Amino acid sequence: AIPVRSSRLPLLSDAMPAPAHLFPLIRNCEISRIGSTACYCHHKHLCCLSSHFAHSHFRYAPQKKFAAVYRPKENFNHFIHTRDHGSAPQRFYLTPPQVNSILKANEYSFKVPEFDGKNVSSVLGFDSNQLPANAPIEDRRSAATCLQTRGMLLGVFDGHAGCACAQAVSERLFYYIAVSLLPHETLLEIENAVESGRALLPILQWHKHPNDYFSKEASKLYFNSLRTYWQELIDLNSGETTDVREALINAFKRLDNDISLEAQVGDPNSFLNYLVLRVAFSGATACVAHVDGVDLHIANTGDSRAMLGVQEEDGSWSAVNLSYDHNAQNEHEVERLKMEHPKSEEKTLVKQDRLLGLLMPFRAFGDVKFKWSIELQKRVVETGPDQLNDNEYTKFIPPNYHTPPYLTAEPEVIHHRLRPQDKFLVLATDGLWETMHRQDVARIVGEYLTGVHHQQPIAVGGYKVTLGQMHGLLTERRARISSVFEDQNAATHLIRHAVGNNEFGTVDHERLSKMLSLPEELARMYRDDITIIVVQFNSHVIGACQNEEL
Amino acid sequence: AARMFLRLLSDIQWRAANPRWRRMTRRSTSTTAEPHPVSLPAQAQVVICGGGIMGTSVAYHLSKMGWKDIVLLEQGRLAAGTTRFCAGIVSTARPVSIELKMAHYSNKLYQQLEQETGVQTGYMKTGSISLAQTQDRLISLKRIASSLNVMGIPCEIISPKQVVQLHPLINIHDLVGAMYVPEDALVSSASVSLALATAASRNGVQIHERTCVSHVTVQKGHVTGVETDRGRIQCQYFVNCAGQWAYELGHSGEEPVNIPLHACEHFYLLTHPLKEPLSSSLPTVVDPDGRIYIRNWQGGILSGGFEKNPKPLFTEGRNQLEIQNLQEDWDHFGPLLSALLRRMPGLEALQIMQLVNCPETFTPDMRCIMGESPTARGYFVLAGMNSAGISYGGGAGKYLAEWMVNGYPSENVWPLDLKRFGTLQSSRTFLRHRVMEVMPLMCDLKVPRWDFQTGRQLRTSPLYDRLDAQGARWMEKHGFERVKYFVPPGKDLLDLDHSKTFYKPDWFDIVGSEVKCCKEAVCVIDMSSFTKFEISSTGDQALESLQYLFSNDLDVPVGHVVHTGMLNEKGGYENDCSIARLSKRSFFMISPTDQQVHCWAWLKNRLPDDSNLTMEDVTWKYTALNLIGPRAVDVLSELSYAPMTAEHFPSLFCKEMSVGYANGIRVMSITHTGEPGFVLYIPIEYALHVYNEVMNMGQKYGIRNAGYYALRSLRIEKFFAFWGQDLDAFTTPMECGREFQVKLEKGMQFVGQEALLEQKQNGVYKRFTMFILEDHDTDLDLWPWWGEPIFRNGRYVGKTTSSAYSYTLERHVCLGFVHHFDEKTGEELVVTTDFINQGEYEIDIAGQRFQAKAKLYPFSSLFTQRRRKDEVELSGYQRE
């Protein structure tokens, strides 16, 4: 996401018209002839852009807007060609194997283990992947199985103004959720174990890609905060059975609260002190799924999205949204904001589709600039480490900042009872949804998964099949296999389409290659970080659960 | 129903035909161990392992030939393995002559089997149609048709229109022609196997099912018995007919017997009957370009094929009682199904019954494996049928039975002999890779000079990389890489697929220039692959033994080289070799490459068991460089500072000398071509040095590298026969003009002497003859290969055995044997020189006849070499 708009906007707007003027020029001229000049212009703009961003952890709105100018498809090729002919004639596009190695670098698959040849979980497994546009990537993903309660947790986290907050949330949120779900006795048991120095019951089993790291330095600090949380839960002991919806909401809010508190209190260790401040001053959205049998809960904060892939009776695919985006496009969100603040702020709350004219998501973790009072912000920045103090952005107070907090981490939770026709769930950051319609996502994943399924052998068995029918079936299977054989991971397949789709909705290798060949400083202008988790459901188990309940 | 049908064959018919069996193996469908009412005998003359078509055929033929004390053991039930699933097509259209003969015999045997045994075999003479989608395919069919016709097997090349008349379902729009063999047949293979078992059983063969052979015991190089899960049987002979398990069984004993074969999955389709059921007499269709075969089956069809991407199976070895139906794999079968529907579009609406997955066994060279183990006497093998088990079953069983009873079969079976392989072909990795190449080859076009692409670079000369860098193109013999020719820099040849041709090949000019260089200057050919033995003794044992085993007189002065045959009792060539007398008591023997196993076994079995007599295989110790050409003498004398002229170094001489810095190089004045020159036997560590010296020194004499194709052209125009192609165990020196290599009066007896004496008195019944094609256009006409029928005055008299283009004569030369068949009775008569000289000859190349001039002696004008008075170098080795 590119949620924050800075006060430097006027500076940038001067540069804005230039590229817009450029396009007619390129369109009307022979590319090779104007190559060098055009290229020069571009670099100039890029340089001035990057120099602006260089000192900041934050992503600015104009960048995106700028990118949007370039976005139209007919212009895209001109731009790339120009680069090639002009400044770097020696540069070659990536070969298909190179493209594949980039696309597959972060892919991860998990298959729920079977017992006695049976998988009793409603989840067959999941595929996940992410493709960076920012360097380093600001998206995070997490997946874990709850060990003390039933269910599986999966989430995507889209960071902004740096990756610190998304990183912290990806490490911590599932522990908060798991603890919120734990019964009183288990909490007591765990507390007693910690108290007496005994080994702790494992709470989560993580399913991590090697690139998904946890920060070692902060683990003690994070653990203490978590422990305080469960101690409070023990003291509260409501005695009621834990409701998943409430647990999710509590966990989200509690973690955001802890992030805020840790930043206010600080840490004697200077590294940690700086870390907790970076976490608090950066932000992250979160979209988390909890699957337990046929019960699917989606807790969403921000503009990542959860989507259910449903196979209709005729075999076609449709998409069902399981989350609402928290941004300016969501009327309810705008209404909520207006309710929470005085009428006098009505005009300034949302400007240019952004919160206070700056932030795209209307809910997020961290982002204390939108939560703390001005006094608190000033105190923390002044007493904080020099790095923080030197940072232009952290010192900057959002305009029209009168009645904080303007931002919350409280999620919206949607519950869905899984049906046999619900084949998969896609959790993805806005990088995907910006480029693809959910209907296409449902179709591509659905066909991919059934393609995989179709590779299982055909058996004639007792059916009446003619040679002609079999021949038709085999031809169709071959065609399908050849289109998906490159990917063993549904998320990778989806990214391939998201980045490489041409106007016909099929992957164009040349386009894919160009997009992935973009240098770091350019990549962000053509695409956002993309993080995808595709969860595949076990229709047999879901069907059986339904029947039992009937 | 398909399963019912197959089941029926293996259980009921067999048991119905043989009431004795009903008592013995009741409830035999139960898979649990059950008591065997009849215990195994403690001993037998022969134990056969395997109750499929091969095992039962061997038992049948052995018992017919009078051997009665035979036990056949089957781990599951009779005919329950590959035999049970076999498609049951008996097809005689085989490119290799011995295979053709086996199939022809099988067909005749199966035809009368039902009458003989009372067991229904389902024999139906349907005929077969082999389709050609390309002209090249049609040529290959015409070649087969020629050889079928001269064997008296009806066969004709027909037009696409005639195809429709024979089989209305065939789509002919893409066909250029076809071959029709009206006497080909269909059988139910399991029934044939059961019929053979029934007949054998009546002749006294004991058959025990559900008896598993664990291993074979061998003592002092001879089979002594068989260990089974039901006890031990002592025996003199063991026959391994274990099909795809033959490899494992061969390796189960202490003394492993290498049987190089490997199984692949093989798929065929069974359908329900057509609306109007197909007639059971409809011919079988083979569409090799579509990689499929189609036969009628119970009113529907049975269609399978040999796909391009086979699935090898059981590489790591896995035994099982009976081949359970393996997984059907429709996606894998897809291309074959497409080919089927393309060939018979009318079958679209036909309903599928089953896709059968039936493993088939393949061998490294696409030919089956038969014969005696080189290491364990009495251990016979018959396996590796390359999916033609039912076609070969009868004939193969007969030949093996003859081999066991008479010591050798009635036909030359060297192309199938187990001893053509050694341990080097027994790697599982090699076999896995090779059979993946072999299986698709079943349908590929078989063109001359074709080389396997897998399992290569196993044995190489130390000069391999040097030669390769200079443009060498390689072929392989017995695992050894040998140069075909050198592609000059800047010149490109066609890629593998496009170079396949029955016409003039793309390397024609390249080889021509190598030949020219051999004639005019000097060439180097790396001939390291030849088999090399050293035989020595403390006393005269070596000389005495060799004098007995070889036909020529080996009691020559030290330093002389003798060309001699290693003959069998009938005077036939078991091996053709050059032997150098290194000292009074030691000999150096050079034989063709693929003699490594056979010759070793032959000598081992016949040399006296004397610790003072030693034989060593030194093949790997020497690199052999053949310097051919008039300037070879100059190169060598400059490098050795020794006079190499004929006075000092006559032909057929051997001397250890220095070449460059390297000492102890064994130089022999032979070239295996009839051209002047030398072969240098170089201890391998000196190979590179000597090669470099020779090439540097040779530069001023115009030296260049050459390959085996040049060598081959040279030796054929000189009328040199070579063993394995022209010469075999059924050819005597008298029949190929080599009396001078036989010393009938050398003062002692030798193997084959009597037979040769008799031939000398009574004359020979075939004569090795050289033919020069007269009206053959090298550029436009089909090239001869081998196996072409020879016609004398319009009558068939024999077949060619090898051929080459002679760059000197600018004509094609074919070598082959001429027989004299009585015009009325067909009886073989003595072939005289007059008979040869007084005929008009024609060679039939794929149905087209070319005039040829017959010669019994090579062109004298081609001889320019110096000779020792008493000897003429007139020998060649297998170089193909």
Image (cartoon, coloured by chain):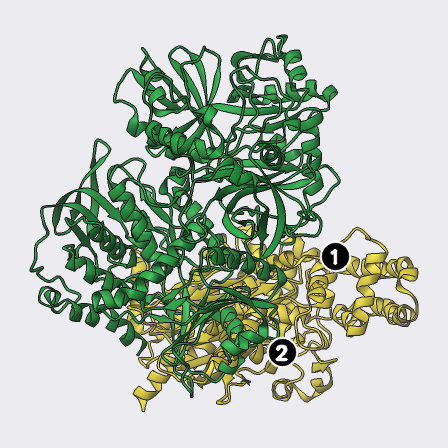
Residue at image x 21%, y 56%? B74
Residue at image x 32%, y 66%? B111
State the residue position of label 1: A54
Q: What distance separates the C-alpha of mark 2 from that of mark 1?
A: 26 Å
Q: Nearer the viewer, residue B613 or A294?
A: B613
Q: Nearer the viewer, residue B40 or B829?
A: B829
**Residue B421 visible in the displayed image:** no
Q: In the visual, does A206 lie left or right of B769?
A: left
Please determine whether, in this image, residue A12 is positioned above or below residue B478.
below
Q: Amino acid at mark 2?
A: Phe
Whole-percent x, y for residue A38 in the image:
89, 62
Please determine whether, in this image, residue A79 is positioned above or below residue B574.
below
Q: For residue A380, which quarter of the picture?
A: bottom right
Q: Residue A362's mark?
A: 2
Image quarter where the N terminus of chain A lies is: bottom right
Chain whose colour in the figure is green: B
Q: Nearer the viewer, residue A442 or B819?
A: B819
Whole-percent x, y for residue B874 in the image:
53, 26
Please determine whether, in this image, residue B691 is positioned above or below residue A491.
above
Q: In the visual, does A11 lie left or right of A452?
A: right
Q: Please tell me whether mark 1 sits on a helix, a strand or a loop.
A: helix
Please determine whether, in this image, residue B727 is positioned above or below residue B3.
above
Chain whose colour in the figure is yellow: A
Q: Nearer the viewer, residue A259 or A77?
A: A77
Whole-percent x, y for residue B800 in the image:
53, 45
Q: Please tell me whether mark 2 sits on a helix, a strand or a loop.
A: loop
Q: Residue A414's mark?
A: none
> Quick check: marks 2 and 1 in contact, CB under 8 Å?
no
Q: Amino acid at mark 1?
A: Ala
Image quarter where the C terminus of chain A lies is: bottom left
Name the chain under label 1: A
Query: Which residue in the rendered view is the most extreme toward the bottom?
Result: A550
